[in-house]
Structures are given as C-alpha cells and as structure tokens.
Image: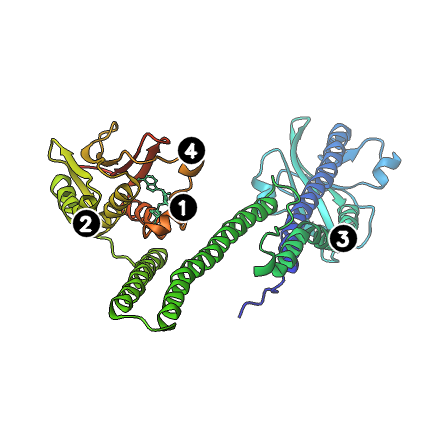
Amino acid sequence: MSLLPKNVRTRLTLWYVLAFTLLLLFYAGISITLVYINLRNNLDDQLQQDYEIVENLIEILPDGSVRIESEEDPYFYERWFEVRSADWKLLYESRPFSGKSLPPVSQKEKTTDGIHFHSLKLKNDVAVRILSGKMNIEGKRLFVRLIRSEERLWSELNGFLLLMLIALPVTILIAGFGGYFLTKKFLSPIDEMSAKARRIGEENLKERLPVKNPDDELGNLALVFNEMLERIQKSFLRLKQFTSDAAHELRTPLTAIRSIGEVGLHGNKDAKQYREIIGSILEENGRLTHLVDNLLFLSRADSKAFNKRLAPLELKSFVEDAAEFIRPLAEEKNQTLAVQSENEIMASADRALLRQALLNILDNAIKYSPENSIIIIRVDLSESNRALIEVKDNGPGISEEHLEKIFERFYRVDKGRSREMGGTGLGLAIAHWAVAAQGGKLTVESKINKGSSFKIIFESYK
Ligand code: ADP
C-alpha cells in the first residue's frame, strides 16, 4: 500500500515542499560555504598583511638573535607570531595570549616553500589560522609563523547558520501553505468538473462541463470531455429515435393485420373472400418479416457482429449474377436491366455484404422507376482509378434537400409511397453501412425528373 496520501492536492503540496526544501538546503549549503570561504580569505589577508609588516621590522643582531623594531608599537602587543632559524630553532616569539602554545613545526610547513596557510585546533580547543612562511633577511634564512584566532570567523559563521536554521523551517512552512492554497486554486476547476459530471445523466445529457480557460490543460480536458458528451448524446438520441421509429414501423403492419382479421371475423364470407383475407395477412406478414430482418441486420452491424471476409472479387460476373436474381421484379414492370462492363475489374470485397448493398440499390431503382424504363448497371474504373459499380435509373430523381438524408435510417422522401411499395426506409442505410464496412463509399447523384445514379466505389482494385 502506498504511503502517499490519496488526495492529489496534498500529494502535490508534499512534492512541492520536498522539492523546495531540497532546493533551499542546497542554496543554504552553498551560501554557508561561500560565507566561510569569504571570512577565511579575510583572515588570510590579515595574516598576509601581518607577515609583510613583520618582514619589514625583523632585524638580525650580530650575535645571530632577532629583534623586532618598534616592539613598543601597540600593534604588536596583540599579534602572535614566532620567528625561527633555518633549523627551526625559536629565535623570537610574541605571544600576547598566555596558556596557548603552538604545536611544533610540521613536516608540511618545513617542506613548503613561500607562504602556507593552515587551520588547526590548539590543545585548549581554540581554533586558529596559521600562516607559515620562509623569508631571507640580510642573507639569513628565517621561518616565520603568524597566528590569528578563528573565533570571530566561527562565531559569524554560527550566527549565519542559526539564521538559516530559523529561516529555513519558516520559509518551508510558508511555501507549504502557499503551495496548498495554490494547488487548491488550480485544482478547483477539476472539483467543479467532477461535481457537474456527476449531475449529468440520461435526462440532462445536453448539459456540458464548465470551461474556464480553453487554452490551459484543464480547459482542454473539459473540452475533450464535452466533445465526448456530444458524441454520447448524439448516439443516445439516434438510438432513441431508432427505437421509436422501429416501434412505429412495426405498428403499421400489426395494425393492418388486426384490421384485416377483424374484417374476416365480421359476417359470413365465402372461401374466396377468406383466401383474399389470408393473402392480405400474409402480405403484411411478409412486410413485417422484411422489416424485422432489416432491423436485425442493422443491430448486428451496430454491435460489429459481422465477420467481414474481404476477398478478390470479379465484379462483372458478380453484378450479372445479382441482376439475374432481381430481374423477375424488373420484368413485372417491363423494365430492362442492362449490365455494362467492358473490362474485367477486380475489387477487394465481402461478397455477401456487397450483394446485399447492390440488391437494395437495384430494388429501389426498380421500385421508383416507371414501367418500361431502363436501369443500367455499369462496372468500370472511377476517375481516381478505383473499381466502381454504378446503378443508373430513369426514375423520379431525388431533390437536393432529401439527397443528403436518404442514407439515414427510416428516412423516406414519400413515406406513404415507400410503404405502399414494401419499403422499410432502411434499404439505403443498410447499403451505405455494408459498403463502408468494406472500406468503400456509396455516393448518389440525382436530380428531380432526371433519374438517379448510385455509385459504389471500392477502396482499391487489382
Ligand atoms: P425505402 O425502403 O423507402 O426504399 P431506402 O432507404 O431504400 O428506403 O430509400 C430511402 C428513400 O430514398 C426512399 O424512400 C426513396 O424516397 C428514396 N430513393 C431511394 N432510391 C431511389 C431511387 N432510385 N429513385 C428515387 N428515389 C429513391
């Protein structure tokens, strides 16, 4: 189980505080180091000055001992230094502070040429900074050590450290509170969105999430969510419309069957009249079956239950076969079904689905075209070099306002006429889906009184 709090706001604040603390510690570390280096450099500068002064004031007496000129100078009362000979013997010592003694000259001091600085702690825990240097005075080589206490350096550094120790937690606390309120402010749109989203249901699907700033990430999230709601609302409305249309369509033949049955029950009829009544009932039943078959087809299409099997298909023989199948319907109206195909054209298609689409289009062409007219089925290549099947009729045509809607489910230009002819308003919706399912496109061109042309254009051809 994660130890991190579940609340995003607290988590963000914690991360922020952690990052901020690390940054502050890093900054404090660098500052303290710089302050230390600066203070130590100051101390070294002072030692260096002392060294130069001492160098100018050393006087070598004839017996080889060392004297410091102007020894009375108060400056020297407070300076701690010693002068040794080249063999490290103490020649002079100024030690203003009693009880403090320097350790013997170290190997490093002995071997280093010129000036050398180092810090050390005396026995009584006093930290000192030592400058050791070798100099030539009147041809004599001398070793000088100057000592200054580091007490002030450490007290200043400790003061600075204390300041940091007090300021750091206070700053972190302020940053933490600031961070918490900032994240609260920034995340408040999410709270508003989730409260709104929780209230959106089936009955108020048209409502949308608030979008405060469409340009930021949260605004973008709300926009994407709203687009999704739009899609859900549309498909919900489509489904609702489809269910109500389907119920309506089913009611018509059912009412017809009921009325015909009631007429049959009424009074005495002869065998011929009963046969007519049964015939009418069977006819309505046929319509019902056709409608239910179409509804089932679309429901399977919607649930993607079709196993499409795309395979190379030779279009000329395929179209001739479909035309042969539907020709009896055309012959009833004395219409001519003509197949035009010059070249052998192959397409990648699902034979059963394509047949269903083509038969629906041909059925419409026969249904809506006048008697004695010609319906042409052309197999060819489109302008963009794709396989194409065109069904062209000399029927009444479809006006522009209806043209874009005829592929919608249950859409009919003339409801009464379509039903009279056994239409369900689903034929073109099915054809459109079946062609699209194979990666193709079903288009229509039509003008009132100038006939219609339906084109199935395939994705590719071989
Ligand atoms: P229906 O079962 O009513 O034929 P469709 O989905 O097959 O339903 O067609 C939708 C509507 O498009 C039809 O009602 C008809 O008004 C119009 N339509 C389809 N094909 C043709 C055509 N070849 N000529 C004229 N109108 C057509």
**Of marks 2 and 1, which one's residue comes earlier in the chain?**
2
Asked if the beta carbon under badge 1 is closer than 8 A to the nearest atom of ligand 1, the reply is yes
Of 397 and 307, the residue lying toward us: 397
Q: CB atoms at circles 4 and 1 under 8 Å apart?
A: no
Q: Which residue is mark 1?
A: 412
Crowd around label 3: few <14 · some 14–19 · many ≥20 (10 Å): few
Three-letter residue code for mark 3? Ile
**Of marks 2 and 4, which one's residue comes earlier in the chain?**
2
**Of marks 3 and 2, which one's residue comes earlier in the chain?**
3
Inter-mark Cα distance, 1 to 3: 70 Å
Secondary element at image label 2: helix
Residue 432 falls left or right of residue 153: left
Q: Which residue is mark 3?
A: 174
Three-letter residue code for mark 2? Arg
Q: Quadrant of residue 142?
A: top right
Q: Which residue is mark 4?
A: 400
Residue 10 percent location from the top left of the image: 66, 60
- Indicate which label's residue lies in the foreground, 2 or 4: 4
Q: Give me the disc on residue 351.
A: 2
Three-letter residue code for mark 1? Arg
Crowd around label 2: few <14 · some 14–19 · many ≥20 (10 Å): some
Of 132 and 152, the residue lying toward us: 152
